[in-house]
């Protein structure tokens, strides 16, 4: 696939925003591959994603840094928050997991198959169960003991490992420990979790048991960015499955694991493809 650049924008809504961006890209000779925008009418906010081809040098190329310099004063004038990235940079990802391996195994398989444009730089776990899986895929494995009593020491070690590997994204693939606000603040909008319920219902531990006790007819799974408030971060993706009075807790767990794999993989892929914008406690996920 050709190398591409992605510009993500959010700002106060006003007339002419699309024209200002597209005109500059046209002047610079960009070949736009995808463009999408969204307006939040209640808040008066505008969101935009533009992706264009970065042609190789033999076809004239595209000077991304020159575009960045030319766009910066326009963004300042219009009050834009913006990021400009290139697919030539493969994000470095760390996977955190505990004893449930279905999500981490699914992500590793998708990555090995070329579905996820990143480098899995390490797996960090508070159990040894994932170590053979990490070895199979050639991903470095780090065991870090983590309990409520040892959380501070564990997070100090984990953060050192992440910094040493220059990690861009942390994925909690059923990591059954709560991260401290200090840890979360180091990776704003760059820690993705999967929760085994359709949030905001059944937060916290044992949500399948709580769902069964409530007699729900739908169970779900949610992928979201992690914030300092447990299970309350901006939601990226959700999916559901229908159940009935015949299903027991173990049935909910088994069916829920399929949902967990799907929603986490989608969230990770969309983040890597720079399709997500956060605002407030919500997300815009571009097609």
Image (tube, rainbow, N blue to C red):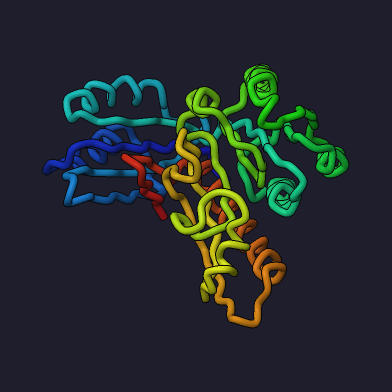
Q: Position of residue 202 (x, y in %)?
A: 51, 57
Looking at the rendered image, the quarter that the C terminus falls into is: bottom left
Above or below — where is 213 with respect to 116? Answer: below
Residue 137 in view (yes/no): no
Residue at 46% over, 41% down: 274
Viewer-proximal residue among 187 and 11? 187
In the picture provided, is 222 more to the left or to the right than 45?
A: right
Residue at 54% over, 63% down: 220
Q: Position of residue 96 (x, y in %)?
A: 68, 37
Q: Which image quarter: residue 140?
A: top right
Above or below — where is 174 with respect to 255? Answer: above
In the picture provided, is 38 more to the left or to the right than 178?
A: left
Q: Which image quarter: residue 62?
A: top left
Q: How many marks?
A: 0
Residue 139 in view (yes/no): yes
In the picture provided, is 197 more to the left or to the right than 71?
A: right
Residue at 72% over, 30% down: 146
Q: Position of residue 193 (x, y in %)?
A: 56, 44
Viewer-proximal residue among 191 and 169? 191
Viewer-proximal residue among 244 and 133? 244
Q: Position of residue 194 (x, y in %)?
A: 58, 49
Viewer-proximal residue among 182 and 46? 182
Residue at 32% over, 19% down: 69
Above or below — where is 235 with respect to 5? Answer: below
Q: Residue furthest left?
A: 15
Q: Which image quarter: residue 20?
A: top left
């Amino acid at each position: 696939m050709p190398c591409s650049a992605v510009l993500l924008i959010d700002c106060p809504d006003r007339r002419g925003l699309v024209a200002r961006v597209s005109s500059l890209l046209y002047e610079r000779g960009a070949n736009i591959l995808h463009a999408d925008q969204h307006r939040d009418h209640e808040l008066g906010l505008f969101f935009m994603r533009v992706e264009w081809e970065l042609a190789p040098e033999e076809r004239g190329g595209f000077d991304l840094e020159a575009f960045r310099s030319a766009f910066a004063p326009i963004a300042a004038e219009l009050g834009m928050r913006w990021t400009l990235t290139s697919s030539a940079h493969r994000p470095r990802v760390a996977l955190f997991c505990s004893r449930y391996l279905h999500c981490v195994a699914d992500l590793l398989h998708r990555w090995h198959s070329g579905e996820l444009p990143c480098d899995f730089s390490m797996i960090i776990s508070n159990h040894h169960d994932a170590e053979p899986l990490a070895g199979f895929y050639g991903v470095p494995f780090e065991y870090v003991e983590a309990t409520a009593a040892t959380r501070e020491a564990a997070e100090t070690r984990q953060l050192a490992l992440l910094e040493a590997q220059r990690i861009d994204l942390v994925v909690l693939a059923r990591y059954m420990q709560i991260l401290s606000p200090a840890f979360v603040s180091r990776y704003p909008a760059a820690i993705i979790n999967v929760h085994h319920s359709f949030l905001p219902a059944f937060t916290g531990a044992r949500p399948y048991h709580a769902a069964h006790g409530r007699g729900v007819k739908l169970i779900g799974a949610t992928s979201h960015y992690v914030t300092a408030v447990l299970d309350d971060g901006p939601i990226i993706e959700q999916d559901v499955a229908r159940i009935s009075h015949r299903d027991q807790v173990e049935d909910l767990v088994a069916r829920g694991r399929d949902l967990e794999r799907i929603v986490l993989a989608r969230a990770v892929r969309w983040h890597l493809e720079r399709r997500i914008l956060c605002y407030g406690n919500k997300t815009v996920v571009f097609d």
